Amino acid sequence: MKILAIETSCDETAIAILQAEKSPEGTEFSILSNQISSQIKIHALYGGVVPNLAKREHIKNLPILLKRAIKESKIKKPDAVAVTHGPGLEPALWTGINFAQNLSKKWRVPLVPVNHLEGHIYSALMQNSKFKIQNKGIFPMLALIVSGGHTELVLSKNHLNYKILGETLDDAAGEAFDKVGRMLKLGYPGGPEISKLAKKGNPKAINFPRPMIYSKDLNFSFSGLKTAVLYKIREILAEKNSRRGRRRDKEFFSARILANIAASFEKAVVDVLVHKTVKAVKQQKITSMGLGGGVGANDKLREELKKNFPNILLPQKRFTGDNAAMIAVAGYYRFTKKKFNKNPKATGNLRLSKS
């Protein structure tokens, strides 16, 4: 079968078309088209995503991406349409849902609503444009989802079966990366810039706290770490300005100091993520482990997880951020279970659950 998927949960407009062929051993997927239009340049002016601007750009970009996807995939119509209905920015989500509903009616095919986070879980299995998901050997699987809005450890005992073992109690890891990036005047999004800068710095230069790393549960907290970085920045600036008298520091920080802050902050985040993941694996006695979400592109995180879990399922970096291909894969499994809905609602705080 062929499934077309739409993703508009935040500031990426995405449409993908996948072909899925079932066999006794599993399902083979081929990505026929994977179109993404980024809005980073627009939102960078405001230092973060503006929901109504995101909605406007989605409305403008969806017809363009659909035309490209249909042309590249060479299909007349798919067998189903999948769409993200949460979590995310509701004005942005509604644009994708409305567009998907119109296509579903036009083509007379089922409409399949998908949780954005389950897309990130399935992205761990996406290493190439062609990949196979086996029926056996994957479950039970632990997924670490690390994105701008979410940091969760999720246990899946089977397809579409989710149990949240731990989650952030405040800022998500990706959100903390972006906020620290703004503190360091690195622009938006700050996460990728911090990661680049960290490679030039000393991760042991500053001993930032590792919030909740030794807590009994599997939850996370990154708000205190973000605050610690802010205080360190103020401390360094105050010290520099006191040495220079009343003249304000014009160059903000030297390249070396900037790199050391970035590296030390990144190390603190990665230490917490890895420690909690190791703890979850031991508690649940899991042998299958995957990574998903935008922060999953971070080289340091991938490297440290690989050290602890040599067989970890790591998605190609192009599938770590928001994309419609991962929504199509999740949509396929929902289609096989007949999880259709002609009138899905945009749910900004949608959670993963057994379904």
Image (tube, grey):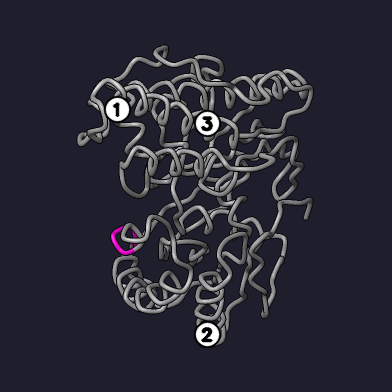
Mark 2: few/some/many CA within 10 Å (<14, 14-19, 20+): few
Number of labels in the image equals: 3
> Upstream in the sequence, badge 1 or badge 2?
2
Residues under numbered marks 3 and 2 in contact, where contact means CB atoms less than 8 Å apart: no
Residue 262, how many percent across, how many down? 37, 27
Residue 95, how many percent across, how many down? 50, 76
* Viewer-closest of 258 and 57: 258
Query: Farthest bottom residue?
Result: 106
Query: Which residue position holds label 2?
Result: 102
Residue 8, how many percent across, how many down? 48, 66
The magenta segment: 38-42
Mark 3: few/some/many CA within 10 Å (<14, 14-19, 20+): many
Query: Which residue position holds label 3?
Result: 313
Residues under numbered marks 3 and 1 in contact, where contact means CB atoms less than 8 Å apart: no
Mark 1: few/some/many CA within 10 Å (<14, 14-19, 20+): some
Quarter location, residue 104: bottom right
Quarter location, residue 180: top left
Which amino acid type is marked by label 2? Answer: Asn
Residue 241 image label: 1
**What SS does tag 3 mark?**
loop
